[in-house]
Image (cartoon, rainbow, N blue to C red):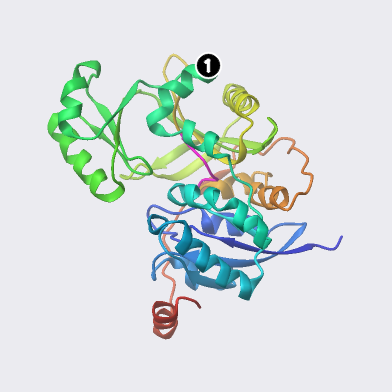
Amino acid sequence: MEKIKVTVALSGLNNIDSPGPGIPVIRGLKESRVLDVRVVGLAYENLEPGIYMHDLVDKTYKVPYPSDGVEPFLDRIRYIHQVENIQVLVPNFDSELFTVMKSEKVLHELGINTFLPTLQQFEERHKSNLPEYGKKYGVKVPYSDTVASIHDFLKIQDQFEYPVVVKGKFYDAYIAYDLEQVSIYFHKIAAKWGLPIVIQEFVRGTEVNVVALGDGRGNVVGAVPMRKTYITDKGKGWGGITLQDQDMMDLTQKIFSQTHWRGGMELELIRTKSNELYMIEINPRLPAWVYLAVAAGQNLPEALVLLALGKEVNPFEGYEVGKMFIRYSYDMICDLKEFEHFSTRGEV
């Protein structure tokens, strides 16, 4: 069967100690049996490793930060599209999804396809809205509240027992064991990601996750659960193993059937000693460990691009249980001329 040729532009090339999903997504696309993919990388920083991984990324362009607004983003995408003829755009960072979703109509008019959640779906699963989300869809979630200052936290601290989890609106989470630590982590996260800050009840148990893809009609195209086997000091899974867990699969199906989620999703869960599942976070895109799902038999990046192209995709049937991933560091050697070219011209 002749493969479908497609040019895919995507972000998340910072494959570092807190990796973006871009490189794992690309690996899945490059291994596709039905797609012949030309990859156009979108980078925010000059030292994102994916820029220089020429076996995976065919061309990379520097793009403005999401905080710069919709118009600078669209202006840059228009230029890249004129050169590359982008057919599918896959944003891989939470912080850029709002900008891309607001631009979907313009992108579609340009001939650039996306497959993303709706603005309503995106907003209601925010960390700050998680208690309401749990009530609406009948999902167990830890108690949480948002604060804009330490003074705000002092007003509600009686509703919590230490330790508590201090979370940024996009990224970062720290466990605080007293008020002093709450203050330290509050200011650290606020300086990086802005306000508000989420204070969440700490639930003891085992961290488990599900990566899944929804078709926007209430169906789960694919889903793979895993347990983290190694966690870094930043809370990132540096190793994991696929599980056979019907409760996690049922919870995923329950959420997707009710919300009609469109696109990739990661469910971050805690399984308590009493075997209860608490949902502590929903990430509205494919996670950095998505290549584990590919290796286990579900090429979710491939399915995502096919859905963006308007193709019918049959749900995956099963996955390999006991498949493991282990991350490692690798010294990639680059040429200074390439770095200088990207730094000055914004493409390489």
- Pick whichever, 188 or 21, lies toward us: 188
Horizontal and vertical percent for residue 209?
50, 34
Q: Quadrant of residue 218?
A: top right
146 sits left or right of 292 in the view: left
> Please, what is the three-letter code of the amino acid marked with disc 1?
Gly
Name the chief secondary structure element in magenta. loop
Q: Is residue 284 magenta?
A: yes
Crowd band around label 1 with a 10 angstrom C-alpha radius: few (<14), some (14–19), many (20+): few
In percent of width and height, residue 105 lies at: 62, 52
Q: Residue furthest bottom?
A: 337
Q: Is residue 160 left or right of residue 79?
A: left
Magenta residues (range): 282-287
Q: Quadrant of the N terminus?
A: bottom right
Query: In the figure, is residue 27 to the left or right of 288?
Result: right
Residue 30 visible in image: no
Q: Nearer the viewer, residue 138 or 63?
A: 63
Secondary structure beneath dot 1 equals loop
Residue closest to the far right: 1
The residue that disc 1 covers is 138
Q: Residue at x 63, y 52 (%)?
A: 114
Classify residue 201 by image quadrant: top left
At horizontal 51% and vertical 67% (from top left) the residue drawn is 75
Number of marks present in the image shown: 1
Where does the image place residue 120, in percent across and percent down from the top left?
A: 53, 34
- On whether residue 172 falls in the magenta region, the answer is no
Query: Which residue ends up furthest to the top in the rendered image?
Result: 274
Q: Is residue 238 above or below residue 89?
A: above
Residue 129 location (% of width, % of height):
41, 28
> Is residue 213 at least partly visible in the picture?
yes
